[in-house]
Image: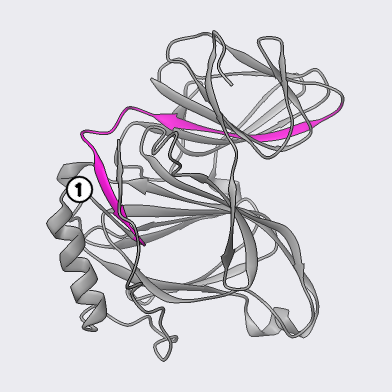
Amino acid sequence: MASDTIDTVLIPRTHDLGGFEVRRALPTQDRRMVGPFIFFDQMGPGEFLAGNGLDVRPHPHIGLATVTYLFEGEIMHRDSLGSVQPIRPGDVNWMTAGSGIAHSERTDRARRAHSNRLFGIQSWIALPQAQEEATPAFAHHPAASLPMLRDGGASVRLIAGEAWGERSPVAALSPMFYADVALETNAVVPLPQEHAERAAYVLEGAVDASGDRFEPGGMLIFRPGDGLALRAVGGPARLLLLGGAPMDGPRHLFWNFVSSRRERIEQAKADWKAGRFAKVVQDGEEFIPLPEERISLRAG
């Protein structure tokens, strides 16, 4: 779909993530990136029965930052830096892979004693070329540390970046914004105009954009520059707004690796296959093998 304000609507594809179904909105053939966002997965909403849980075994990353943001449930993050951190609804885990990191994402053993729900988003942020080989780092930001904006029936938590005159404490490495928006019926939220590339992902309810109604499960990509506002119609709505400046050149994407240089991707593949990445602390026995057959995408 295209209109005067909406360039396209991306319909997520379904994938399996450690025994849990996810919906992938980015990347697609129609759109590789929105600002620095190069990957966007919705996990759930769903429920694990007692004795079960999320089990994403140790795997590597380069050239990106991962952002985990939950609405329900809890995930235990462990990485090769020694970070061990539960993430809960409203918190932000920001892991800068840079030159190379490995991590795992699992349901903690104690939570497996009973059924538990999980609902959240994992996204990847491509790093600027000057930061692609940055020293790996991990930062956790509790929900209470993130800016909250309220206007009428709109409540906005700024997850990362800058928008609406506020700045998140999450240390993004390029101009961007990422926000969790809750709207009461007929409440509106304006898109930040300072960012060239902008998108909205509808989670719950329905929103109106320039006279068109959009239900959950799609990512709306907006044309640059328009002073557009989204309105909740037919009841409350929840959505994520995201975007930023266009990237400084195209990116190659293979499995969990992102780089502006194809040869760097090949080196990362060889390093993981040969066991040259550091092991995940407290979770070093298992790992996800390098896929032997995988189509490499060029983003941007």
Q: Give the residue drawn at x 12%, y 58%.
A: 263
Q: Inspect the magenta stretch and tell me whether residue 241 lies in it.
A: yes
Percent of width and height locating residue 214:
71, 26
Residue farthest bottom in this picture:
285
Magenta extent: 235-256
Above or below, comparing residue 79 to residue 160 in the picture = below
Residue farthest left in this picture:
263
Q: Give the residue drawn at x 21%, y 60%.
A: 265
Question: 39 and 143: which one is in front?
Answer: 39
Question: 15 and 163: which one is in front?
Answer: 15
Percent of width and height locating residue 83:
41, 73
Q: Give the residue drawn at x 62%, y 14%.
A: 229
Q: Residue 250 occupies which quadrant of the picture?
A: top left
Structural crowding at the residue carrying mark 1, measured as other residues with C-alpha within 10 Å and reported as few (<14), some (14–19) or many (≥20):
some
Percent of width and height locating residue 188:
70, 17
Percent of width and height locating residue 123:
47, 50
Question: 245 and 144: which one is in front?
Answer: 245
Name the residue type under label 1. Answer: Gln
Q: How many marks?
A: 1
Residue farthest right in this picture:
234
Above or below, comparing residue 165 to residue 247 in the picture = above
Q: Inspect the magenta stretch and tell me whether residue 254 lies in it.
A: yes
- Indicate the colouring scheme: one colour
Label 1 residue SS:
helix
Question: 7 and 126: which one is in front?
Answer: 7
Residue 246 horizontal side relative to residue 66, left or right: left
Above or below, comparing residue 245 to residue 33 in the picture = above
Q: Which residue is mark 1?
A: 131
